[in-house]
Image: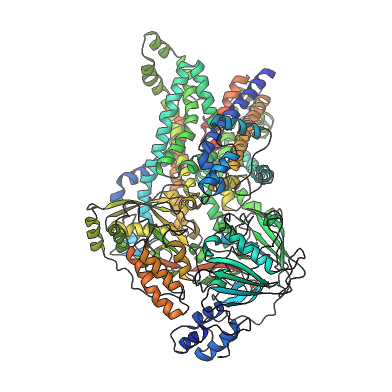
């Protein structure tokens, strides 16, 4: 049908034809179409051919490159924090996954355009109700210790996430999984208690690498016993210093180009990172800050990469803490805030202005809501009504976890709010002191990383009693609206259902979410075929050095 | 000592710089062309027209605030916090030093030992211990500086007090039955004032730099307080593209430090009695 | 001669003991805090209680301190919670790196400071003296964080002649030492030159030099043959006292140039609340301070046998504490 093929070669998923119709009618875009098709197990190539026939060529073509034949060999130096990664499923930092990703692999691979591709899983087939998912695993994959990769490894890994004593955040995100069933030597079935569409994408989360079935028996310390299925093996590892990977023989997939990848921890000073890049001491920086842009643009042998992502900061208020337990105070803060000015001064205009409901334009289910209009008079009136005729004093905690632009943005909000009589006292602490209390302070500025789907973030951050619910919002109507949206396959319908979700968030006035910040990184001009990833899941298997 | 005009030049220069900054601090609201906390145009270079016949003499920072105005108001923050921190350190150091020097014996041994213990911490180690324990704020910086400097002041005062304790006028006062407190404060302290003022000038300068370093390490005064160290820290990432962001605050810190050092040198030259035991008897 | 040294050693031991108590009190008095820092913010109450029980944190504070002290004394310095290795594994390399940086700084700084100081002190009040003195005050007034930025701007980004990060990732590279050394030397050379000058001035005014001058001894011989030995007594002790500053006062420079030394280790330990590591670093810094003070006393006594020991002690020990540049320079 329509030339679309399932990766598994089985019958096309029931929801696929409807998606095709919507693409033809122009109700959904090419990107949303490809992403959803990939979740349903439709081959990305066939979906892409279909989409090209209907709406023309890719909207995000790969950047034009000179006709160069990739060169093999060489050692690439990558500046990145080297963190503790004893248990890859329990790490809470993406940097750690960028390091172990060279040895440990995932069931699926989500590319920079959010399309899911086969990886250790060759194909997947969801049931029509999206509650049973069959994964066919790749054959001929061997662990670096010579063992065969089998369904047992996958079942072991997933069960380990869900075990009662699990320390992995996957315990929450895969809570809907009720049973992991081995249905063949290379086939596995997941049983869910509710419909989830994005399972293939979720399996590429940074802490979802497939571990060897004997991981716990072998000491449960990955850097000490770094077995994996990937093309590289860990040669050296020291937290806070370095991690070196060397190419190994016997990889199942396409041989990568680089012989060696050296991750180097250069501390927290971005000036040192750029100086090292400029002097040719390193090749790729994990990321650079918005304040580094001007310098990078002046460096002759450096390429600047920019990308849009659904990453943001929220200056969120806890609904059960004084004075924010009064919604009128929270509303006054939102009415006083000037999101556009925060973007321009705090982030130098390098992003997209947001409207306080934490769903981004780049996310498929985005429904555009009008922003809260700035109205100082009304903010003052609300404050007066709430019993603060002379204004109110509040303390905003800022950890500068992503750089000083957090504190700059907060200073703009401080100016904005001062106009309405809300006197914000900034409490700036080092980031290592912010994270231990990020969900405890009444008023704090928290950075939220990109997630391909808005519902993933909302489920984690705003559902009643959710693990990372830092605002303490407990709204039954919101939970119900979110449940409804999460079960809808159709992008257009889902987006419509999101209207209610977004509106509740905005009306509850739990956060000033001023803008979506662009991502930047700087790499040496010698580096070829390195791509940014909205989630920072950088893959170096196609990268080579000129 | 020869009293020619020429050698006094550096001292006058130093005094002038210090006076200038003190005037800035006192008259900040009248001197500053703009509100130091208000955003105008971001990252304007120095000597730009601000419209309405006004100028951004030193440019603006990333949030569009006038740097000259922030420097002028920053003099307030620096002089208030550094001054406050130095003053509390002096109160404690002087009190301890006078007690140790007057009573000698066990009191002296105990206080000297405590001072030695604190002094054996490298100062930055001490700051990191304190600030990571209690968090960064103006008050905590005062606390940290007091804790770190008071023992050094204690040593100077103690050395002076031990010497003064043997002088005739003190012995006479004791024999006349004056209270120890009276003797310490009214008889001994004024005679120790000279070297202490010299040391205070230097210490005020170092406290200024210390607040700057703490700002640099992200442990300084909370924004948007326009303190010079914090301005350097905030502007540092952009400094390679917009040097004016940190050039002027650095000049401010360095000039105040320079002024205080030159002033201290001059005062020390004027000091009649060289202080053998303090090691600070530099020309 | 033996007894004062012994007494001094006892005093040092006492100070170390007091310091260890303070460090332990500040960092580990609140055992609940320690559990949170070791297990992370997402640990549950039960986990924390279990950890505290397993690690003996439910014992009275003094008992815990004594246990910790005993362990510390025999070299069991605990695990670093950030680096996940025993603390003693981290220290030798970091200390070595910082010692290298300190060594390089001293190699640059000493000849420069001595020459400038002697030149200025030989002829007090001359034009050379006044220029040098002003220059010394001026360089000491520029904080390291400022000179780091400006030197990096010039040599790394503008001229492009020096590497900007000094992590030594591909092994030892002398080029990577240049900028940090330059910043440190620039900041501290002025102070040492001033001490040298002061000492030189004092010696030049001493009767025996004046007498030699009257006899018509040529200035070069006068300085090299007669004045120098005595004039360098104070500066040499000051150098000893700057060593602790070069060990842990270099935090700013090490962080800025991503140099993996003791200073940046201490800074990272502080930022990550890595208690065992902070304890070890603090104890080492203090031990170095006390050791250099002790050595500086000995050197002073050796170079200057005319003075009786008591004055020597007061003089030498007085210098770091009361002149902020050595002790309190940030």
Where the N terminus of chain C falls, by quadrant?
top right
Q: Give how far across and how far down residue A219 sits, in percent.
A: 70, 53
**Does residue C138 appear to the left or right of C182 in the view shown?**
left
Q: Give how far across and how far down residue C25 sits, in percent.
A: 53, 34
Q: Quadrant of residue C189?
A: top right
User: Which of A492 and C98 lies nearest the eye of the viewer?
Assistant: A492
Residue located farthest toward the top when viewing the structure as drawn: B175
**Does residue C173 appear to the left or right of B14 in the view shown?**
right
- Can the viewer see residue A317 in this picture? yes
Q: What sort of colour scheme is used for the picture?
A: rainbow
- Can the viewer see residue B18 in this picture? no
User: Which of B151 and A371 lies nearest the eye of the viewer?
Assistant: A371
Q: Give how far across and how far down residue B89 sits, in percent.
A: 43, 32
Q: Quadrant of residue A2?
A: bottom right
User: Which of A173 and A313 lies nearest the eye of the viewer?
Assistant: A173
**Does residue A364 appear to the left or right of C172 in the view shown?**
left
Q: Give how far across and how far down residue A357 sits, in percent.
A: 38, 67
């Amino acid at each position: 049908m329509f030339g679309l093929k399932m990766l598994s070669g089985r019958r096309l998923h029931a929801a696929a034809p409807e998606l095709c119709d919507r693409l033809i009618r122009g109700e959904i875009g090419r990107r949303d179409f490809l992403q959803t098709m990939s979740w349903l197990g439709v081959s990305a190539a066939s979906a892409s051919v279909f989409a090209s026939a209907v709406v023309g060529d890719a909207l995000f073509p790969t950047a034009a490159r000179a006709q160069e034949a990739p060169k093999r060999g060489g050692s690439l130096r990558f500046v990145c924090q080297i963190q503790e990664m004893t248990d890859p499923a329990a790490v809470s930092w993406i940097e750690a996954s960028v390091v172990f990703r060279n040895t440990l692999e995932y069931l699926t691979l989500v590319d920079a355009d959010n399309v899911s591709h086969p990886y250790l899983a060759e194909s997947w087939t969801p049931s029509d109700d999206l509650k049973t998912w069959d994964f066919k695993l790749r054959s001929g994959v061997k662990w670096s210790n010579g063992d065969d990769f089998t369904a047992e490894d996958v079942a072991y890994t997933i069960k380990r996430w869900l075990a009662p004593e699990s320390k992995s955040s996957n315990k929450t995100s895969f809570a809907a999984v009720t049973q992991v069933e081995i249905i063949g030597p290379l086939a596995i079935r997941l049983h869910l208690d509710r419909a989830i569409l994005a399972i293939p994408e979720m399996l590429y989360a940074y802490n979802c690498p497939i571990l060897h079935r004997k991981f716990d028996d072998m000491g449960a310390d990955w850097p000490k016993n770094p077995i994996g299925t990937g093309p590289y093996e860990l040669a050296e590892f020291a937290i806070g210093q370095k991690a070196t990977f060397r190419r190994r023989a016997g990889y199942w997939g396409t041989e990568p180009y680089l012989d060696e990848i050296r991750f180097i921890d250069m501390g927290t000073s971005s000036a040192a990172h750029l100086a090292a890049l400029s002097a040719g001491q390193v090749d790729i920086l994990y990321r650079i800050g918005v304040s580094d842009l001007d310098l990078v643009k002046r460096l002759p042998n450096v390429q600047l990469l920019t990308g849009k992502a659904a990453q943001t900061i929220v200056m969120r208020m806890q609904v059960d803490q004084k004075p924010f337990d009064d919604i009128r105070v929270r509303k006054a803060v939102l009415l006083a805030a000037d999101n556009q000015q925060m973007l321009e001064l705090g982030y130098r205009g390098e992003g997209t202005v947001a409207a306080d409901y934490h769903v981004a334009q780049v996310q498929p289910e985005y429904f555009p809501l009008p922003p809260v209009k700035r109205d100082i008079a009304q903010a003052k009136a609300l404050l007066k009504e709430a019993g603060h005729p002379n204004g109110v004093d509040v303390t905003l905690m800022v950890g500068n976890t992503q750089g000083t632009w957090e504190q700059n943005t907060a200073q703009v909000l401080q100016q904005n709010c001062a106009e309405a009589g809300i006197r914000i006292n900034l409490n700036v602490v080092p980031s290592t002191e912010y994270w231990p209390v990020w969900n405890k302070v009444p008023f704090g500025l928290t950075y939220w990383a990109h997630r391909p789907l808005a519902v993933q973030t909302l489920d984690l951050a705003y559902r009643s009693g959710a693990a990372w619910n830092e605002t303490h919002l407990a709204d039954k109507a919101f939970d119900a609206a979110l449940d409804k949206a999460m079960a809808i396959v159709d992008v257009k319908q889902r987006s419509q259902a999101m209207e209610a979700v977004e509106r509740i968030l905005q009306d509850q006035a739990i956060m000033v979410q001023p803008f979506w910040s662009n991502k930047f990184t700087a790499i040496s001009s010698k580096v070829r075929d390195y791509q940014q990833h909205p989630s920072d899941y950088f893959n170096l298997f196609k990268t080579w050095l000129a | 000592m020869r009293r020619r005009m020429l050698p006094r030049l550096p001292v006058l220069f130093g005094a002038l710089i210090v006076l200038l900054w003190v005037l800035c601090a006192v008259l900040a609201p009248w001197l500053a062309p703009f509100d130091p906390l208000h955003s105008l145009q971001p990252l304007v270079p120095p000597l730009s027209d601000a419209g309405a016949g006004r100028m951004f003499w030193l440019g603006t920072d990333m949030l569009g605030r006038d740097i000259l105005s922030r420097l002028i108001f920053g003099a307030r923050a620096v002089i208030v916090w550094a001054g406050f921190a130095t003053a509390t350190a002096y109160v404690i150091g002087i009190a301890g030093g006078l007690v140790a020097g007057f009573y000698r014996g066990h009191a002296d041994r105990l206080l000297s030992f405590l001072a030695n213990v604190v002094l054996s911490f490298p100062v930055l180690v001490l700051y990191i211990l304190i600030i990571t324990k209690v968090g960064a704020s103006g008050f905590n910086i005062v606390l940290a500086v007091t804790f770190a400097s008071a023992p050094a002041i204690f040593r100077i005062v103690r050395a002076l007090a031990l010497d003064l304790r043997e002088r005739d006028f003190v012995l006479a006062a004791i024999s006349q039955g004056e209270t120890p407190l009276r003797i310490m404060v009214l008889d001994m302290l004024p005679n120790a004032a000279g070297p202490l003022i010299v040391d205070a000038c230097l210490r005020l300068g170092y406290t200024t730099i210390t607040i700057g370093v703490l700002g640099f390490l992200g442990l300084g005064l909370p924004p948007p307080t326009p303190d010079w160290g914090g301005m350097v820290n905030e502007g540092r990432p952009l400094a390679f593209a917009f040097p004016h962001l940190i050039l002027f605050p650095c000049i401010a810190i360095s000039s105040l430090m320079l002024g205080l050092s030159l002033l201290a040198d001059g005062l020390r030259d004027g000091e009649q009695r060289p202080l053998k035991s303090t090691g600070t008897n530099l020309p | 001669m033996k007894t004062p040294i012994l007494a001094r050693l006892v005093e040092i031991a006492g100070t170390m003991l007091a310091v260890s108590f303070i460090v332990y009190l500040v960092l580990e008095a609140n055992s609940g805090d320690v559990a949170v820092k070791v297990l992370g913010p997402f640990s549950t109450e039960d986990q924390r209680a279990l950890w505290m029980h397993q690690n003996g944190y439910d014992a009275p504070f003094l008992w815990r301190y004594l246990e910790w002290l005993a362990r510390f004394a025999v070299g069991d310095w605990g695990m670093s919670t950030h680096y996940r290795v025993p603390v003693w594994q981290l220290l030798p390399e970091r200390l070595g790196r910082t010692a290298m940086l300190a060594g390089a700084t001293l190699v640059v700084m000493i000849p420069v400071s001595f020459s400038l100081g002697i030149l200025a002190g030989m002829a007090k009040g001359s034009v050379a003296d006044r220029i040098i003195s002003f220059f010394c005050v001026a360089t000491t007034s520029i904080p390291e964080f400022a000179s780091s930025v400006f030197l990096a701007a010039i040599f790394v980004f503008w001229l492009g002649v020096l590497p900007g990060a000094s992590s030594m990732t591909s092994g030892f590279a002398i080029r990577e030492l240049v900028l940090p050394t330059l910043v440190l030397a620039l900041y501290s050379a002025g102070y040492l030159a001033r001490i040298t000058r002061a000492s030189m001035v004092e010696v030049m005014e001493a009767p025996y030099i004046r007498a030699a001058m009257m006899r018509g001894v040529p200035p070069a011989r006068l300085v090299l043959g007669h004045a120098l030995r005595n004039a360098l007594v104070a500066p040499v002790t000051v150098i000893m006292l700057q060593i602790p500053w070069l060990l842990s006062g270099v935090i700013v420079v090490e962080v800025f140039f991503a140099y993996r030394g003791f200073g940046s280790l201490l800074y990272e330990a502080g930022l990550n609340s890595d208690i065992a590591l902070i304890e070890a670093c603090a104890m080492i810094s203090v031990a170095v301070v006390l050791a250099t003070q002790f050595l500086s006393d000995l050197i002073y006594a050796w170079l200057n046998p005319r003075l009786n020991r008591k004055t020597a002690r007061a003089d030498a020990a007085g210098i770091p504490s009361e002149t902020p540049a050595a002790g309190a320079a940030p």
